[in-house]
Image (cartoon, rainbow, N blue to C red):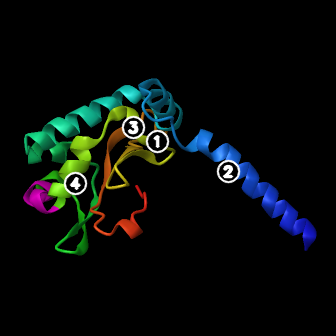
Amino acid sequence: MKIRTQLASLIVLICVLVSPALAQNTPADPKNVDQSIDTLLGDHTKVRQLVTDLQQAVAKHDAVAVAALVHYPIRVKLHGKPTYLNNAKAFVKNYDHIITPDIVAVIQNQKYEDLFVNYQGAMFGEGEVWITGFCIDNACKPPDIKVGTIQSNTNPSTKQPSP
């Protein structure tokens, strides 16, 4: 029993020491974000461009442009009910229910150099929006970089990053 406890403690210690280096870039340094994205997701220039395009499209309330940046199917909540949208047409139709004022604020306030980056993607805010790489063929090279998650988090105690 004592050996198991010591082994478990050692594993926890290793995870604590190693995981920050693997999980996230250092905020406020675009070079660290670029390096994290290149290492974990693919080409950082595609992610940077998607962030810019998303912010500009949302600022213009351009539903068609935002819909073009999304990977389908995407799971969203419509009228409190989880729903899958299979294409851009369905996204545009429901745009104002998906891109709510809270989501607009998260997107507009996100600075590229402050993105949280891990193997799952680049996270806006506290997980409301995730940019992720999607395989378009068996080789998965290069991945297609798109918005993979849009989720309103109205209860701060339940906010959890999940692409």
CA separation in Å, label 3 and label 1? 9 Å
Q: Which mark is residue 103?
A: 4
Q: Reading the chain from its start, which is encountered first: label 2 or label 4? A: 2
The residue where tag 3 is placed is 114
Q: Is residue 19 magenta?
A: no
Quadrant in which the N terminus appears: bottom right
Q: Which residues are magenta?
A: 90-97
CA separation in Å, label 3 and label 4? 17 Å
Label 3, secondary structure: give it.
Answer: helix
CA separation in Å, label 2 and label 4? 31 Å
Q: Which mark is residue 16?
A: 2
Label 1, secondary structure: give it.
Answer: strand
At 22% from the left and 59% from the top, the residue drawn is: 86
Q: Position of residue 81 (x, y in %)?
A: 23, 75
Q: Position of residue 88 (x, y in %)?
A: 16, 52
The residue where tag 1 is placed is 117
At 21% from the left and 34% from the top, the residue drawn is: 53
Q: Residues within 10 Å of mark 4 (few under 14, many from 20)?
A: many
Q: Which mark is residue 43?
A: none
